[in-house]
Amino acid sequence: MTAEGMDLRYPGHGLWPLMLLMGFLVLYPGQIMSGDTTSRRWCDIIWTASPHAHRLEEHRVKYVYYSIMMVSLVWGLVAMTYFNPLQFGGEACVVDCRDLLDQAPPGRSPLVRRERIEAWKKKHRPLRFGDVVIFRSGYSGRHYRPLPEGRRIIGDPSAGTIAGVARPRLRR
């Protein structure tokens, strides 16, 4: 759930800034490590492959490293400024299919019919280009277990001993 979603669901509790802070604390270390790893890798490649780099004194390699880090930073700022992330994928549209759970014969999956999608669109909004439709079946929540009991997720439905997870069927 987004910070905005938490604030809308529980207004007046100050959850919006708290959720943003939590998101930052989760994402920041990974981004720093990713930037460092990328810069180190390219610095190693340049140091290994470039005769010009070999002429540098060892303590000057840091300038190559920080130059790569700065190029990455500038590119990140340009990307955040000029590109809308929703152009790569729209909103998540969750279609509830929990009533289909365990409704098919063993080895089969219940079908999510077009009518269910049309009902979702009527209740919420039309689907737009790039939207991601997610079918909430409740299957994992009810049946996921560590192995060997966890065969229920893929192994048993594939073997035809139990019903599988609901799957969409949009063509008539």
Image (cartoon, rainbow, N blue to C red):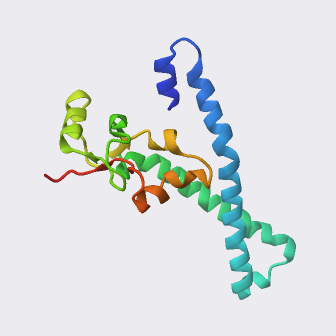
Is the residue 169 above or below the residue 124 in the image? Answer: below
Query: Which percent across, then down, holds residue 83?
Result: 41, 50
- Farthest-out residue, top: 12
Q: Nearer the viewer, residue 120 or 156?
A: 156
Q: What residue sits 48% from the left and 26% below the top?
A: 4
The front one of 79 and 99 is: 99
Left or right side of 125 for 93: right
Q: Is residue 22 left or right of residue 40?
A: left
Q: Residue furthest bottom?
A: 51
Residue 70 can be seen, yes or no? yes
In front: 4, or 9?
Answer: 9
Count of numbered labels shown in the rendering = 0
Write the residue at 19% across / 44% down.
114
Answer with the quarter of the image where residue 131 lies. Answer: top left
Q: Residue at x 60, y 24 (%)?
A: 17
Image position, residue 77 (x, y; %): 54, 50
Q: Is residue 91 visible?
A: no
* Residue 102 percent location from the top left of the image: 38, 42
Q: Quadrant of residue 113?
A: top left
Relative to 154, say whether 139 is above or below: above
**Extreme residue in the left direction:** 172
Q: Is residue 19 left or right of residue 80?
A: right
User: Which residue is located at x 73 percent, y 66 percent?
Assistant: 65
**Image height of 116 relative to 61, above or below:** above
